[in-house]
Amino acid sequence: MRRRLNIALIGAGRIGQVHAATIANRVVTARLCGVYDPVLSAAKSMADRLGISKVAPSADAIFQDDVVDAVLICTPTDTHAPLIIAAAKAGKHIFCEKPVALDLATTDAAIAAAKLAGVHFQIGFNRRWDSNYARVRAAIAGGEIGSLRTLHITSRDSGPPPISYIKTSGGIFLDMTIHDWDMFRFLSGSEIEQVYVQGGVMVDAAIGTAGDIDTHITLVRFESGTLGVVENCRQAGYGYDQRVEAFGSLGAIQTENNRPNSAVISTVDGVRHALPHHFFMTRYTDAYACEIEGFVDSVIQGKPVAVGGDDGRRALAVGLAAKLSYTEQRPVRVSEVG
Ligand SMILES: NC(=O)c1ccc[n+]([C@@H]2O[C@H](COP(=O)([O-])OP(=O)(O)OC[C@H]3O[C@@H](n4cnc5c(N)ncnc54)[C@H](O)[C@@H]3O)[C@@H](O)[C@H]2O)c1
């Protein structure tokens, strides 16, 4: 294996641009060797900006390219599984954005293809790599706060994505809360047993017309007996609100929002500091770098990925249970959906 992993990017949109810039500027163990996007201008402008030598004419051209060791799939969710299966057949290692797919059968087919090909397959649950959440996980796993009683996650976007995105994203429970389902599992070390959703459309009626909701509070029960609450909203005027609190028999641990600077201004009018980071691109910059470094290390050193297909599947199953809970207005056990 080469010392630097040759990675090709598929999908040069919002998250693709974040990952491409991360690899180009921060990941010394990898090199971007190609990019494909059906919107040629998006691929070309990324290639020019970051010095990527090849703009591929198709995803297939990337899969057939012997120089490519691994692919980063950053396309709309409904295209992930076919791309994963094709990449696996071509023997490429795979990093794919969340969620793997919008249903369990398609997710299983993608996981099976990667397994059969013997390639590394990592899912883009970037929050696992954030230092705040890693500290909460360490406190819980190390017994610092005793036995875990409750977990609260607040996760509000600064603004909603375009309606065109919402139509293909699988909706709030599979697109946005998918990170929180994974965080619950990661932080607690326990599987989610049951969810009960209350939600509605409070941000934009067009989101409701597109078949989704934009705000919800969900009660969670874990197999361990721990209770959880997650609150999501697609719009928070003051920025990207990302906080966690864990409460146990010996105490509690909580994280605050990260801000672009830590300055505190005190005057006779009051005490002020900067708003939280505006969105995921700046809030999770370090986490994105760590997750790509982790993926590259796993491939180069031949060790298992930290967050793989099974984690993607389990988070998706909880999301599907939440969808059912919202539709039928009742608590739903995750085992009901698989
Ligand atoms: N982990 C995170 O923090 C995070 C953040 C945002 C989005 N995402 C996930 O990343 C994925 C992409 O989201 P986004 O916000 O970047 O979307 P986006 O619409 O901004 O970008 C998608 C890009 O993929 C291209 N594309 C469409 N079909 C393609 C195909 N078949 N082959 C190659 N390229 C194709 C589009 O032209 C576009 O440039 C989604 O699955 C989303 O859930 C993850």
Image: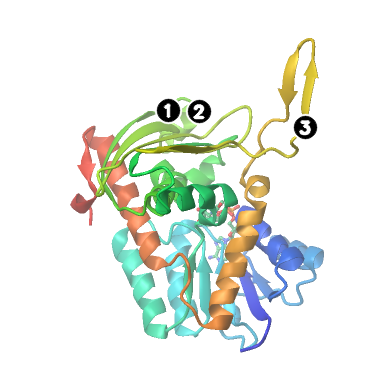
Circles 1 and 3, Cβ within 8 Å, touching? The answer is: no
Residue 66 in percent (x, y) is at: 61, 89
Q: Residues within 10 Å of mark 3 (few under 14, many from 20)?
A: few
Residue 81 in percent (x, y) is at: 42, 67
Residue lying at the far top of the rendered structure: 268
Residue 104's image quarter? bottom left
* Disc 3: which residue: 263
Q: Residues within 10 Å of mark 2 (few under 14, many from 20)?
A: some
Residue 228's image quarter? top left
* Disc 1: which residue: 201
Decide if residue 134 is in sight here: yes
Quadrant of the image containing the N terminus: bottom right
Residue 213's image quarter? top left
Colour convention of the picture: rainbow
Circles 2 and 1, Cβ within 8 Å, touching? The answer is: yes
Three-letter code for the amino acid on which mark 2 is drawn: Asp
Three-letter code for the amino acid on which mark 1 is drawn: Val
Q: Residue 303, which numbered label?
A: none
